Image (cartoon, coloured by chain):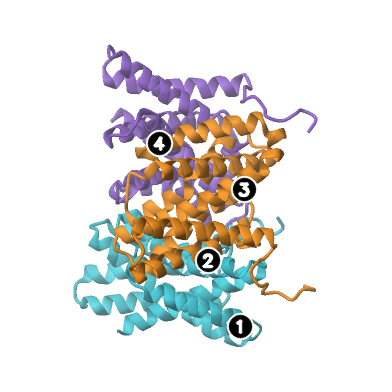
Chain colours: A cyan, B orange, C purple
Amino acid sequence: MFFQIIDILGTIAFAISGVLVALNKKLDPFGVFIIAFVTAVGGGTLRDVLIGKTPVFWMLDMTFLYVIAGSTLFAVIFRYKLDKLRKSLFLFDTIGIGLYTVIGVEKGLAAGLHPLICIALGTMSACFGGVLRDILCNEIPVIFRKEIYATACIVGGMVYFGLSAMDVIENNLVFLISGLVVIVVRLTAVVFKISLPTLYRVNQ
Amino acid sequence: MFFQIIDILGTIAFAISGVLVALNKKLDPFGVFIIAFVTAVGGGTLRDVLIGKTPVFWMLDMTFLYVIAGSTLFAVIFRYKLDKLRKSLFLFDTIGIGLYTVIGVEKGLAAGLHPLICIALGTMSACFGGVLRDILCNEIPVIFRKEIYATACIVGGMVYFGLSAMDVIENNLVFLISGLVVIVVRLTAVVFKISLPTLYRVNQ
Amino acid sequence: MFFQIIDILGTIAFAISGVLVALNKKLDPFGVFIIAFVTAVGGGTLRDVLIGKTPVFWMLDMTFLYVIAGSTLFAVIFRYKLDKLRKSLFLFDTIGIGLYTVIGVEKGLAAGLHPLICIALGTMSACFGGVLRDILCNEIPVIFRKEIYATACIVGGMVYFGLSAMDVIENNLVFLISGLVVIVVRLTAVVFKISLPTLYRVNQ
């Protein structure tokens, strides 16, 4: 129940981020909805397809469709006022990737995959929706360019396996702590403007 | 038999639309064929992958490969004369999305999915080929920007379930009527230049 | 064992080609790694998803992840010196597509698919990684524009079935010869600057 609420908050944040990018590109109402949908479910869909869990998750639970449709409507109507929600949205989004990362890791474990692959799967679940959004809108995906985003997911995934290996903390708590690590790493990076070290000379 | 002919006409129209976009981007012969192929089978492929029906449809029925190869050859040779076929191609394309929508809806039903998900699946089957074509050619997908296209599919899908729920019309007729609705909605929209209401101020 | 070494050399070449494109687009370290990864495993992943062989190959064999991570690190560190390796990389890449084509063909056969579909599958396995790399970096895929690349794969695939049909050469040798055909066709095309006939008037 608690996780379901987080899941819905994350879906809302992802969908709204899709709406904002789509409006910026002047897409029509259908296009806006599709971008919102793809942003919200793209990561989990890739995860399910790669491990062969089909039909994919949003086909089996209508909550996602309803939440995304509602969020899109809300975001389109109130788009000129969304600036005031920017901080809440950022928070939801960050909580969302924390949750999706850990869910992805656990789905990988359930499929009997190697820990590193599970971490990759969790990171994809959290990040691929945003990548698809940017590709569909004809941009180089933002997460490849400047944000500590995927890195936070990877760190959270590593913490998950580190804690599991210690074998003293119960599983639910491992889930919670790892998700929190993703959130804390991302918040810290944003607040202190930390980014990955650049590979390029500054004057380039 | 009747539906197979429609299916082939739709495939031809989709393939040729791919060829035209690819030629416009000055792709080489192989690139042109690939874009034609992806445009024609992309929607059904996504549908099959998402519901887990693999190997996907065009791997199991060689008709598609042959029809697409033939259409590509034809379109490349006669490209300077295709303008005269523009109306026929538009009609084939429209008939094609009508058929693909209803096939997609029925495949979703066969997989036990919720009606709204079936409508989404049908719409994807009809539209995703064109989306892939535009992404591969580095354009923002045209259906996100200006056409009543997906909307026609959605309306047709809703009619399918509306008629089925009434439970007085036999299934074949439901299939036919819903497909026709897709076609009529799209033709009407194009003839009367109807588009989705804009989300943007006109002077923007 | 012999084929595994080729597979690794091919993976290295693909990963490094990804790194070079990503650096050129000024992506951050994470983005560079992802592009390298996607370039190296994209083709085989599409192959496995389309025929329903999931979890996909790189989730079941950690070699790929390690080799790609190592290659990325190497390529990032020595990127200003990679020019000297250009010929070796081109050779690895060419050997790689030869191998991937034939592996793809054989996976298609194992799934009971038609020879032409197997050839398509082999070609996709070899080429789709590069296509994904270019899409993610917001370019029209290079193989659609100017190289004898996919064509070499298609020719190799056809030789595979031609030799198999003759039924006098043992299977391992068919595998080897077909792979070599891919390599020779591509090398010949590059050395003699052969490309597909253009579809466009020269003064266009």
The kind of residue tagged 3 is Phe
Residue C125 visible in the displayed image: yes
Residue A157 visible in the displayed image: no
What kind of element bears circle 4?
A: helix
- What chain does mark 1 sit on? A
What kind of element bears circle 1?
A: helix
Q: Residue C190 placed where, x, y %?
A: 59, 24
The kind of residue tagged 4 is Leu
Same subunit, tags 4 and 2 = no
- What chain does mark 2 sit on? A
The quadrant of the picture occupied by the N terminus of chain C is: top left
Name the residue tied to disc 3: B90
Q: Residue C8 placed where, x, y %?
A: 38, 37
Which label lies toward us, 3 or 4? 3
In this view, the residue in front, A154 or C155, is C155
Q: CA distance from mark 1 to mark 2?
A: 17 Å
Which of the 4 quarters of the picture holds residue A27? bottom right
Up the image or down, A177 lies above or below A52; here it is below
In this view, the residue in front, A79 or A66, is A66
What kind of element bears circle 3?
A: helix
- What chain does mark 3 sit on? B
Q: Are marks 3 and 4 in contact (CB under 8 Å)?
A: no
Q: CA distance from mark 3 to mark 4?
A: 31 Å
Name the residue tied to disc 2: A34
Name the residue tied to disc 4: C121
Which label lies toward us, 4 or 1? 1
Question: At 55% from the left edge and 68% from the top edge, which residue is drawn?
Answer: A195
- The label on residue B126 is none
The kind of residue tagged 2 is Ile
